[in-house]
Amino acid sequence: MRIVTRPDFDGVVCAALLVDALDIDAPVLWVEPNAVQKGQVNIGAGDIVANLPYRPGCALWFDHHYTNRHDQPFEGVFEIAPSAAGLIYRYYQNRFSREYSELVEATDRIDAADLTEDEVLHPEKHDYVLLSMTISDGANPDESYWNHLVQLLRSRPGKAVMEDPLVLERSRQALELNANFVSCLQEFTRVEAHVAVTDFRRLPNAPVGNRFLVYSLFPETVVNMRICNITPPGDIVAVSVGHSIFNPNCRVNAGLLLSEFGGGGHRGAASCRFAAHKADDYIPRILNTLLANEDNETV
């Protein structure tokens, strides 16, 4: 039995809950949704897939993304919810070795971007928010750290997790990255009407940092479109779209929009990746939909 999930905060918490509830000792397989969508991940009969699109043959599936709806029978839970971790927590509520309600509540809020401006601007004052910022995505694989967090979260309360030496160091690094990220956002973001367009393609490596900062820096906008090159291999472009958490007037379903370009996600946050030669076609089409700001959900 193996856990297959993505390397973000929700995915790490999913893994911690599943390891505890099912006493799994096999290594976690960390993958990105795009790889699952393209059939690049070998899913076996005993695998538990969490926070990712459904794959035939898995033993259990837990997910909450709008664009990952699946209408065939399966074992597990799919529900539009704040986090996949919350679904797992309720599914196995009587099988845990300790109390996880505080962790799951924090995961719900972070994955649903239900944060205050103070949490965005001062994550050092909010343990789980800062912890979530120490987890890089698949562009910078860090499996040993993700696995370390899984073991910490299943065995320690939040304060004790934050006191771990490696977490302390990663937290310090995250705060430094955030400071640099503010400067990068200001330099590489342009405002078109109500859309903040952040284009990092001129940079050899896209800067990383607090994804919610852009909403504080450009409060007049209702949505952010971020574009960057994926290196390696260098011939892939990634686009992410996120509704502002402080100016909630974007009517476009981001997950549905980016599903048209090989991606997907939630109504308020989604991403896609495609070959660089398609950028001149795809990017204006995505931007024009955001500028029109019309409800794109089918009835």
Image: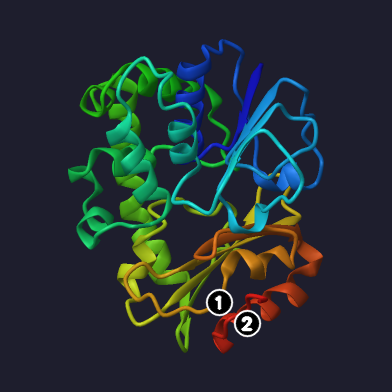
> Which residue does the image show at 38% across and 70% down from the upper left?
186
Instruction: Residue 155 in the image: state x and y as whole percent.
Output: 34, 16
Depicted 1 relative to depicted 286: above or below:
above
Quarter of the view holding residue 106: top left
Q: Which dot marks residue 252?
A: 1
Lateral position of residue 207 relative to residue 126, left or right = right
Q: Position of residue 56 (x, y in %)?
A: 80, 36
Residue drawn at x 55%, y 49% as measured from the top left: 79
**Which coloring applies here?**
rainbow
Q: Earlier in the sequence, mark 1 or mark 2?
A: 1
| Residue 98 coordinates in the image, percent (x, y) | 32, 18
Q: Which mark is residue 289?
A: 2
Q: Quadrant of residue 105?
A: top left
Q: Left or right: 2 with respect to 81?
A: right
**Along the horizontal axis of the image, is 287 left or right of 278?**
left
Distance Cα–Cα, label 1 vs label 2: 8 Å
The amino acid beneath tag 1 is Val
User: What quarter of the picture does the N terminus occupy?
Assistant: top right
